[in-house]
Amino acid sequence: MATAFANLRWHHDLRLLSVVETALLLLMVAVIACMAIWRWEPMVVFPSCAVLVGGFVVVAFSLFTRWSICVPVIWPTLAASLCLVGGTFLKQLHFRNLSKELFSVAQKYVSPHAWQFSRGGEGAGHRANMVFGTVLVTDAANFTRVIEGLGDDLRAGVELLTAYYSAISTPIDEADPPGLIIDTAGDGLLTIWDAPEDSPAVRLAACRAAIRIQQAVDIFNQNHAPTALPTRIGVHAGDLAIGAIDARERRFIKAVGDVTNTASRIESLNKYLGTSLLASYAAVVGLEEVLLVRPCGAYLLPGKLEAVSVFEIVCETSSATHEEIERFALYGSAFDLYSKQCWPEAQAAFERYLETYPHDGVARKLLEKCKTAHVRGSDSADARVLVIGAK
């Protein structure tokens, strides 16, 4: 109809685009629309495309009036609109799937709790959650010697650490509730179980994880005998703050409070006492029916102003052997005398105990304290405190 009208009105033929030219035009419009929607945000693309479509209509009108070239307008405009809408939908779907994949990968390296902190947005680094936290600190003995023994075989060191961290982090992830691994430094972990207030169930989860870490380390050392990494563990509980700290382009999840420092000091105390798993009174109070623990005395730890009552976590009571129950009943009798400051009687009780268990480092340190306190004749409460001079 348009061609016939033009022939009658202007006495010349109207040129239509060929099928190939029309297909190329539609393809060009679709490519431009798809590239635009993929590169820019919809809020920028849609107004820009509206301007471009308006310009295209003006150009098509000029070609029609001046050179009698009929450029289709409806189909390119419809193609551009469909590409914009479809491209926006596909882009959102792609980034949604990409976000899920990224979250899945991130979970292998960052706990879900820390991931939520990392997604806090601008200013999240200035917020902190006040919680009651149970802190578990680990440290591998002989780590430096083992790494030096590997020489230039750095890949073997990476493989060893990968197997070691996998062994000790699994009990943390499988705890109920799982712990939040805040920091890894060389050969150690710092993990937190947080709750709005003191929760025996949460503290029990941390203590059970510590026991299972010991078991996992035993299996690891059996499988890596030449590069065994005996591990010391310290557990403490108290109030602390957890927050995301922004440092330029990086974000770190940190716990701030004296609890983490004390847990680290308790972990170091293992070396002094010859133990492998120690916890504070605050961590094990109320859990005596579930856990087999023995009191180790009060210690003034490095950098601390007040003494901390320390306990050794032996195992869960359900798995305690008859020998362990008898052993620590005998030890408990001696410790009761020590607590009452009956120095001669406590000294004799510890000596009898050590005849059967000569390698018990805790009993040996308390025996030494009994001897010095008895000689000095001190009856004050501070007489029971053992002062640790170095970390």
Image (cartoon, rainbow, N blue to C red):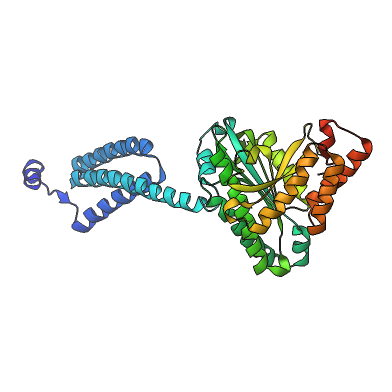
Q: Quadrant of residue 336?
A: top right
Compared to residue 297, the image places residue 175 above or below, namely below
Compared to residue 282, the image places residue 327 above or below, namely below
Q: Residue at x 72, y 39 (%)?
A: 262
The spot of residue 217 in percent (x, y) is: 65, 60
The spot of residue 237 in percent (x, y) is: 64, 38
Residue 244 visible in this rendered orientation of the protein = no
Q: Residue at x 73, y 69 (%)?
A: 226
Q: In which quarter of the image is residue 156?
A: bottom right
Compared to residue 177, the image places residue 319 above or below, namely below
Is 114 situated left or right of 364 in this image?
A: left
Is 2 situated left or right of 370 in this image?
A: left
Most foreground residue, 373 or 337: 337
Most foreground residue, 81 or 368: 368
Q: Where does the C terminus fall, quadrant-wise?
A: top right
How many marks can you see?
0
The spot of residue 241 in percent (x, y) is: 61, 33
Most foreground residue, 329 or 33: 329
Q: In which quarter of the image is residue 50?
A: top left
The spot of residue 23 in percent (x, y) is: 23, 55
Residue 145 visible in this rendered orientation of the protein = yes
* Residue occupying the far right of the picture: 375
